C-alpha cells in the first residue's frame, strides 16, 4: 500500500513588503496586513527576518506580528546576543538562525555550523530551553547537518539558492544535493525545511522531495503580487507545491 505523502507547509516570508514600505517611510504597505492576507490565502506560517541593520522588518513589526497572527511565526535571525534577547522576549514559535553580512543583498549562503559551533551552541540551547523551535539555515552538506544534530537543533532549513540560480545539468546536480541532504536529515532525526529563491518554475522538484516538510518563500511572492495580487500568487504557489507533492503537474 502506498503511504500518504507527508503534508508540505508553506511559510510566507513578508520581509519585502516591509522593504517597499521602508522605501518611503510611513506605514504602507503594512507587513502585518500582508501576513493576515497570506494566512487567509493558504500560508501555514509567517516568516520574517529581523536583520541587524533593520533594512526591512522592524522591531515593531515583530511585536505586532506576534500579537496579530494565529499561525506559527518563524523569526529569522543572526546568532547574536541582541537577536537572542529579542527572540526570548517575543517567543516566536520558531527561530531560524541565518548568517548575516551587512554588505549582502540577501542571505547568500548557509550557516557554517561546523566552524561556528562554539558561537551557535549556547544560542541553540537558550532558544530551545525557551520552547522556541530552532532551525539552522544550511547548505545541503552532510557535515553541516551532522553538526546541527550534535548541537541539538531539531530542524534544518536547506538553502535552495544555488539550485535556483543554476541552469540545465547544474540545476539537476543541485537538486540531487538537496535530495541527498533531505534524506540524510531524515536518517539522523532532523526535520527538514527548504527555501531561498524559489519561484513558480523551481518549486515543484523541491516540493516533490518527500522528507522536506516546509518551504519558506518570500521575494518571488511579493514580486508576483504586483501582477496578480498577494493572495493569487500564494494560491498558485500552493497549487504547484501540492500537485508536486502528489506526484502531479499543476
Ligand atoms: N529561508 C531563509 C532562511 C531566508 O533567509 C530567506 C530569505 O530571507 C528565505 C527562506 C526566503 O527567500 P526568498 O525571499 O528568496 O524566497
Image (spheres, helix red, strand yellow):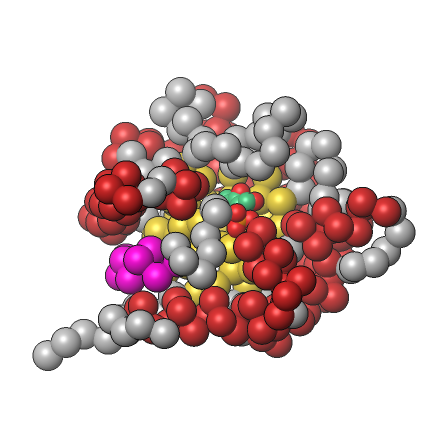
Residue 233, given in percent of the width and then of the height, sits at 56, 68
**Residue nearest the observer in this picture, 223 or 127:** 223
**Image quadrant where residue 232 sits:** bottom right
Is residue 210 rendered magenta in the image? yes
Tell me if 198 is positioned left or right of 174 in this view: right
Residue 41 image point, x, y percent: 58, 75
Residue 35 lies left or right of residue 106; in this view the side is: right
Q: Nearer the viewer, residue 129 or 37?
A: 37
Instruction: In the rendered view, tell whether residue 48 sits above or below residue 52.
Output: below
Residue ID at (33%, 43%): 167
Residue at the bottom extreme? 1
Q: Residue at x 31, y 69 (%)?
A: 245
Q: Position of residue 227 (x, y in %)?
A: 64, 66
User: Is residue 101 visible from the viewing direction of this image?
Assistant: yes
Location of the C terminus by quadrant is bottom left
Q: Residue at x 65, y 26 (%)?
A: 102
Q: Is residue 146 visible?
A: no
Q: Report the span colored magenta.
A: 203-212
Residue 9: in magenta span: no
Which quadrant of the figure contains the N terminus? bottom left
Amino acid at each position: 500500500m502506498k503511504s500518504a505523502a507527508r503534508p508540505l507547509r508553506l511559510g510566507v516570508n513578508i520581509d519585502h513588503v516591509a522593504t517597499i514600505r521602508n522605501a518611503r517611510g510611513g506605514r504602507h504597505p503594512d507587513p502585518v496586513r500582508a501576513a493576515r492576507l497570506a494566512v487567509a490565502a493558504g500560508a501555514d506560517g509567517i516568516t520574517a527576518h529581523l536583520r541587524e541593520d533593520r533594512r526591512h522588518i522592524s522591531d515593531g513589526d515583530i511585536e505586532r506580528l506576534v500579537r496579530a497572527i494565529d499561525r506559527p511565526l518563524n523569526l529569522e535571525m543572526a546568532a547574536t546576543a541582541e537577536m537572542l534577547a529579542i527572540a526570548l522576549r517575543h517567543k516566536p514559535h520558531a527561530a531560524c538562525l541565518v548568517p548575516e553580512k551587512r554588505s549582502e543583498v540577501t542571505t547568500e549562503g548557509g550557516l557554517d555550523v561546523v566552524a561556528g559551533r562554539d558561537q551557535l551552541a549556547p544560542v541553540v540551547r537558550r532558544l530551545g530551553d525557551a520552547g522556541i523551535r530552532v532551525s539552522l539555515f544550511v547548505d545541503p552538506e552532510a557535515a553541516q547537518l551532522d553538526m546541527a544534530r550534535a548541537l541539538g537543533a531539531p530542524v534544518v532549513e536547506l538553502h535552495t539558492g544555488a539550485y535556483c540560480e543554476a541552469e540545465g545539468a547544474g540545476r539537476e546536480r543541485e537538486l540531487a544535493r538537496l535530495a541527498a541532504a533531505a534524506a540524510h536529515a531524515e536518517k539522523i532525526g532532523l526535520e527538514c525545511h527548504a527555501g531561498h529563491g524559489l519561484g513558480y518554475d523551481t518549486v515543484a522538484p523541491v516540493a516533490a522531495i518527500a522528507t522536506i516538510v516546509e518551504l519558506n518563500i518570500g521575494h518571488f511572492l511579493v514580486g508576483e503580487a504586483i501582477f496578480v495580487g498577494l493572495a493569487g500568487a500564494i494560491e498558485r504557489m500552493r497549487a504547484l507545491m501540492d500537485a508536486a507533492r502528489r506526484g502531479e503537474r499543476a
